[in-house]
Image (cartoon, rainbow, N blue to C red):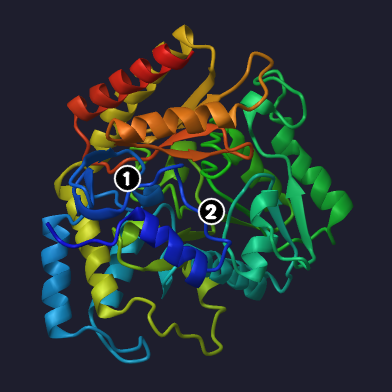
Amino acid sequence: MANFIGAKNIIDKKKKYIMPCLGHFYFEPPQFVRGEMQYLFDDKGNKYLDMYAGVSVINCGHCNPFITEKIIAQIKNLQHVCNIYLTENFVNLAERLAEVTPGKLQKSFFCSTGTEANEGALLLASIYKKNSEFIALQNGLHGRTKLTMSITGIGMWRTDPNPVGGIHFAPNPYCYRCPLGKTYPACDLECANKIETLIQTSTSGKPAALIAEPIQGNAGIVVPPKNYFKRVKEILDKYGALLIIDEVQTGFARTGKMFAIENFDVEPDIMSVAKALGNGQPISAFISTAEIADTYTRPGASTLGGNPVSSTAGLAVLDYIAENNLMQNAKERGAQLKNGLLALKEKYPIIGDVRGIGLMIGAEFVHADKSPAPQELDKVLEQLKDMGFIIGKGGVGRNVMAFQPPLVIIEKNVDDVLNALELVLSKNF
């Protein structure tokens, strides 16, 4: 076995050399040293079923041989030139994205991270609309640059002491904890209707765009009602504002469709993608209709955006998703997982809500009074880790168990994690 420095030494080096804003999961975290499709291995040889996929990144599995071989071949041939030079992969990938994205989305700009893609999407909306006012949703998360942090609606991630102005927040469609105290469907989508009031009273009346995740990931897998985005789009169209959809976490087959917004039958004007597009390689993009994209004419480039290696990974990801029917597997395994979690919810009141689409599912841990139960969740996640299961967490109260696994998981994997979770719950609650 290789001579790894171990978790304790990594933590010691983190304290000395890494900025303290970067935390880590678990009271006793393992050092991960190897990945193989839906599995991770630590420095002690322990095997884990990964049910988080690096936060929706490894949709096609860790070190997927099909993708890895293509990446290696490209590295041996041409690793990098800036995208101001002509290479083939990035235009081919842009063509493929135009084919698989919804509606009339056609032209892409490649960069390296989801934050960059969202920043670029907001810039494009400003250029097209000649306005820099934006609407975002409470509890949304869009990045860590000044603008994307300012448009993020979760306090713990808004660490900039002087956020950008001209940003207005609308209530998010969080039915389990409705910010307006309503109940769906009797509410008549009041959270969406509030957007019109917001435009009329808090903006110039002509905001550039609204940005939203189709399913709010970091907020705790918050899934809007089916007709929510249709109502939102109607309001935005009335006031000439664009709809920017942030698919950084939700994209590339995770919800049983290529993009989560397709579950809501709405076409965005601009869309951002990242994470799973590279299956671990750093690549992102914002993509728009030709009409909107063609207004971005002043010079723009990204040194690493769409480089030959990352573009190769993106093309291989799209091929693997299609050839291995990952959208269907996400639907089937997602239904299996969600049904199992709903059954556990009936037995264990510590689980207050189960929600999600496909293989993006959250289980919210609560006390008897419905208040968040983050400490109880941390205890469960620690015990599951010790049993060989890696599961994420989110939520404003950090009390939502987040299942976002590689889309290659099989029926037995889901049974195993549900059985392990029930064993932990039965011992603790």
Q: Which residue is at 54% across, 12% downward? A: 349
- Left or right, 237 with respect to 86, comes to right
Vertical placement of 140 versus 265: above or below?
below
Alpha carbon distance from label 2 to label 1:
16 Å
Of residues 205 and 219, which is closer to you in this image? 219
- Left or right, 68 with respect to 268, comes to left
SS at badge 2: strand
Of residues 50 and 197, which is closer to you in this image? 50
Picture coordinates of residue 376, whole percent (x, y): 54, 26
Q: Is residue 291 visible?
A: no
Amino acid type, label 2:
Ile
Residue 139 figure quarter: top right
Residue 416 figure quarter: top left
Q: Residue furthest top?
A: 347
Of residues 9 and 247, which is closer to you in this image? 9
Q: Is residue 213 visible?
A: yes
Picture coordinates of residue 306, whole percent (x, y): 34, 76
Q: Which residue is at 22% across, 43% downward? A: 38
Residue 253's disc is: 1
Picture coordinates of residue 278, whole percent (x, y): 30, 62
- Left or right, 224 with respect to 336, comes to right
Q: Residues within 10 Å of mark 1 (few under 14, many from 20)?
A: many
Residue 398 figure quarter: top right
The residue beneath circle 2 is: 245
